[in-house]
Structure formats: C-alpha cells, structure tokens
Amino acid sequence: PAGPAARGPLAGRRVVVTAGGTREPLDPVRYLGNRSSGKQGYAVAAVAAARGAEVVLVTTSGLPVPAGVRAVPVETALEMAAAVHAAGAEADVVVMAAAVADFRPAEVAAHKIKKTHAAAPGGTPDESAPVVALVRNPDILAGLVAARGASSSPLVVGFAAETGDEDGTVLEHGRAKLERKGCDVLVVNEVGPGKAFGTDVNTVHVLRRGSDGVLDVGPASKDAVAGAVWDVVGDLL
Ligand code: CTP
Ligand code: CA
C-alpha cells in the first residue's frame, strides 16, 4: 500500500501484542482474575497495524479486533505463554501489555466446588472455608528475554502498573523493574483510584534500557499512548 504506513519503521514488521488479564481457573465456573480491560493492548495493536506492521494479538479480552490484526484468543497465563512463544519466535517486536497473573491455583477442581461437604454417616457436614493453594506462573516476558540470548531480536516491551509506596516512587519502581526484567522498553503505568483500569485515558512514563531519560505521556488517550510507545520502539528497530 502507498502512504506513510508503507514506509515507516513498522512497515512489514512482525509484531506480537498481548492484551487483557489472564483468568486462572479454580473449577469449571470460577477463576482468579484482575481488572485489566485490555484496552491499552488493543490500542497498541491497532496503531501497529495502522503503521503497516503484521500484528498478532494474543488476548483474553472480548473487545472487537482492530482492523488488520490477527487475534489469538487465550485465557490462562500458560496458554498465553504458549501462544506468545509460538508467534514470538519469528517476531521483530513483542509487546507484553497483558496483565498476566503471577500465580494460579495449584489444582483445578474437576467439579464445581460446593460450600458444604456431606458428612460421613453420623458426622456433621463440613462447612469450613477452603484454602486455595497457588503456584507461580511462568514470567512470559522474562522467558522472551532469556530465549533471545545474545541476539537483540525480538525487541521486548513490557508494561508495568505501579503505585508509589514507602519503598519508592512510581518511577523508581519502574526503573528497578526494567533492570530486573531485562526488556528494552518498559511503559510504566500510574494506577490507583480512577487511573487506568477500564478508562480510555492513561498516564505513562516510557523507560528505555541503557538510557536515563524518560518520556512522560498523558493524561492522554490510550491511542495516543500507543502512538508514543511505537515512536520510541520504531527508533530502536
Ligand atoms: N509479565 C509476564 N509474565 C508474568 C508476569 C508479568 O510476561 N508472569 C509481564 C507483563 O505482561 C508486563 C511485565 O511483565 O509486561 C511487568 O509485569 P508486572 O506484573 O509489573 O511485573 P512482575 O515482574 O510480575 O512484578 P510485580 O511483583 O510488581 O507484579
Ligand atoms: Ca505481576
């Protein structure tokens, strides 16, 4: 196609974007989840496609798939990990905008968990609350960084929702996370009451590995945030 999308740094690039919160099943009807809407990830995917990239969107969200994007629906962190590794091996850029659950229930009950368990003959029914044991999910982003080894492809972009606390500011937590995870770009998202979750505006700080600079974006639409992220990533490609 003609036009700017045919010429920019994203033209013809293979991009994988994840979006939404993973759902970690407890039983056939219940899951552990989080409040991520997936909107920011969808905006990231839509802007990449508009700029000429070939985009695979690995998603837990039912939002409408943006034009020019191929969606791969998943639910759990393990499913997302498998889909990202399958699509990511050939990718130029992977953007982990999904809110991946750090833990999942150690066991998934085959049947719906009942609140009361029948007693043995002559005994009293068991009404005690169950204790849910959790195990760690794989860190998909860290796995991508490890798998590329000494090569610099794919570029790996993380998103981190942070609140300031007694241990540091939003930015300090973001810098530490960028170093720890070894990705190329970390988009630090300020969260808290009325911020980010489910809304259409976002305030972020874009950090790059090996650079002390920070690009502050917003409050801005999630589309504008996505554009700013791709401007930074495009310069690195
Ligand atoms: N991420 C991932 N796999 C996980 C957890 C997180 O790929 N199991 C990715 C997210 O998609 C995001 C980035 O890592 O791009 C940062 O996620 P975050 O939850 O902020 O980082 P954690 O290392 O899990 O740290 P925290 O203890 O603050 O949750
Ligand atoms: Ca986490």
Image (spheres, rainbow, N blue to C red):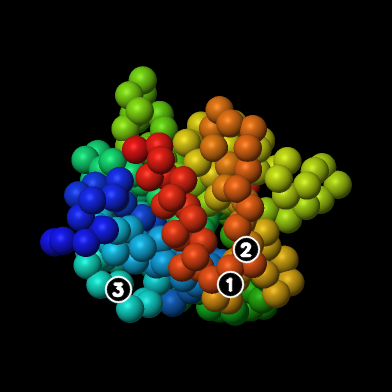
Residue 62 is situated, as x and y percent measured from the top left of the image, at 36, 76
Q: Which residue is mark 2?
A: 218
Name the spot of residue 122 as percent of width and height, x first.
62, 78
Please name whichever residue, 134 or 34, is drawn nearer the observer in this view of the structure: 34
Residue 232, placed above or below residue 40: above
Q: Is residue 139 above or below residue 30?
A: above
* Residue highlighted by disc 3: 65
Crowding at dot 2, Cα within 10 Å, few <14 / some 14-19 / many 20+, comes out as some
- Looking at the image, is 70 positioned above or below residue 118? above
Q: Nearer the viewer, mark 2 or mark 3?
A: 2
CB-based contact (under 8 Å), mark 1 and mark 2 = yes
Q: Position of residue 108 (x, y in %)?
A: 44, 61
Instruction: Give the residue at the far left of this rendering.
Output: 1
Type of the residue with mark 2:
Gly
The image's mark for residue 108 is none
| Front label number (1 vs 2) | 2
Q: Residue at x 64, y 32 (%)?
A: 212
Q: CA distance from mark 1 to mark 2?
A: 8 Å
Label 3 amino acid? Val
Q: Amino acid at mark 1?
A: Val
**Secondary structure category for the residue under label 1:** strand
The answer to whether 178 appears left or right of 57 in the picture is: right
| Residue tagged 1 | 201
